[in-house]
Amino acid sequence: QGQPKIYHDNNTDSGTTLERAFCNDCGSPIYHINPKFIGLIAVKLGIFDQLPKPGMALYCKDRPHWNKAIDGVEEHEDMPKLTVHNEVSR
């Protein structure tokens, strides 16, 4: 409810400034927008009551040994070079 608090984060791996939105009451992350991917909003999973299956796993090189791969999920060692079409189609 209400309007989220917006933070412009320039401390990113790519150097791209991201727009991050948080709940104005509790501080929970809601989404972020990367201007390199026009029309794409990355919604944070914590806002869902039932989690959707992921379509892609990023930064797998940093995954702990106990966190196993998910069958059918595309994996990347770090952030791949993607186009909006690739991400939107997932």
Image: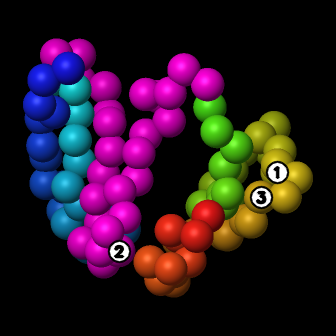
Marks 3 and 2 close (CB-CB < 8 Å): no
The percent coordinates of residue 52 (x first, y second) are 64, 39
Secondary structure state at the residue bearing disc 2: loop
Residue bearing the label numbered 1: 69
- x 28%, y 59%: residue: 33
Q: Earlier in the sequence, mark 1 or mark 2?
A: 2
Q: Nearer the viewer, residue 31 or 14?
A: 31
- x 70%, y 43%: residue: 53
Q: Quadrant of the N terminus?
A: top left
By what rule are the colours in the image chosen? rainbow
Residue bearing the label numbered 3: 73
Residue bearing the label numbered 2: 37
Residue 2 magenta-highlighted: no
Q: Is there any visible trace of residue 61 in the rendered image?
A: no
Secondary structure state at the residue bearing disc 3: loop
Q: Nearer the viewer, residue 14 or 5?
A: 5
Above or below residue 22? Residue 49 is above
Q: Earlier in the sequence, mark 3 or mark 2?
A: 2
Residue 47 magenta-highlighted: yes
Q: Report the Cα–Cα distance between label 3 and label 1.
A: 8 Å
